[in-house]
Amino acid sequence: MTKPANAVSSSHPVLETRDLTVRFGGHVAVNAVSCAFHAGSLTAIVGPNGAGKTTYFNLISGQIPSTAGEVFMFGENISKLPPPLRTRRGIGRAFQLTNLFPFLTTLENIRIAVQARANTGLNLWSMWSSHKELIEKAEYILEQVALTHQRFTVAKALPHGDQRKLEVGLMLALEPEVFMFDEPTAGMSVDEVPVILDLIKKIKDQGNKTLLLVEHKMDVVRELADRIIVLHNGTLVADGEPNEVIASAVVQEAYLGAAPDKSKEARA
């Protein structure tokens, strides 16, 4: 049931990995993964703990160098670029652990990201009164992520759920072409989860962004994903539509821990 990486769309991919591999000593954490991701789609990347999902994300965003293989963005080979330059090319990344300016307020965090996106200069501490339009944009993003009421709260003092929302706000401010979410609902309360999911849905509904999601919660995957790819021991073992992949024997065995139903396979 595994499909070619380009099976989802006939259009040119926004992001593509070709035989992407990384070894740590004798351990192959990601093993020759080739996959293409297209605008307007949300791909969920699933698999058991240690399958290589976050490592695959790290290779794409440049947090770790690959041992072999390549990463392409709009057909350009970006494999040798460091993370900041990949961000400039349009890759946005939210981590399992929040990645914020901890001693700045919520609004200041967003302001810096907005200013960086606008490329207004290297002085991040310039007078914001002269950049009214950028301030207004920062305020708008705070409203989008439901943090207006926390605008003057220092980031490190925010509850965990609000820190996750702020990190999504930073990504929105940078206006990436590719949004990468690594377990965005991890550690969040039941009440906080819908806010993050609604934000992801809004980004997806724009129709021109490419979204990648690492997520263990299958109800979240079912709700959001157009496509699921499955990693197991660093290898891509399944790629297709959510219902098809979730019902497959390889996922039931590798991801859910269930033994494959031989009788169903025989009937098929």
Image (cartoon, rainbow, N blue to C red):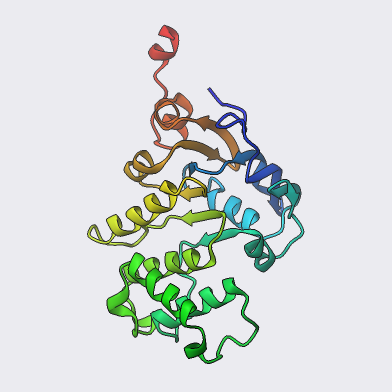
* Residue 120 picture location, percent across and down: 61, 80
* Residue 137 picture location, percent across and down: 44, 73
Judge from the rendering whether residue 141 lies leftward or rightward of residue 124; answer left or right: left
* Residue displayed at 43% across by 48% down: 204
Q: Is residue 246 above or below residue 76?
A: above
Judge from the rendering whether residue 251 lies leftward or rightward of residue 194; answer left or right: right
* Residue displayed at 62% across by 35% down: 11
* Camera-nearest residue between 43 and 132: 132
Res 38 quadrant in image: top right
Labels in figure, total: 0
Outermost residue toward the top in this view: 267
* Camera-nearest residue between 214 and 255: 214
The answer to whether residue 163 shows anywhere in this view is no
Res 154 quadrant in image: bottom left
* Residue 141 picture location, percent across and down: 40, 69
* Residue displayed at 60% across by 50% down: 56
* Residue 156 picture location, percent across and down: 39, 81
* Camera-nearest residue between 256 and 169: 169
The answer to whether residue 213 shows anywhere in this view is yes
* Residue displayed at 53% across by 61% down: 93
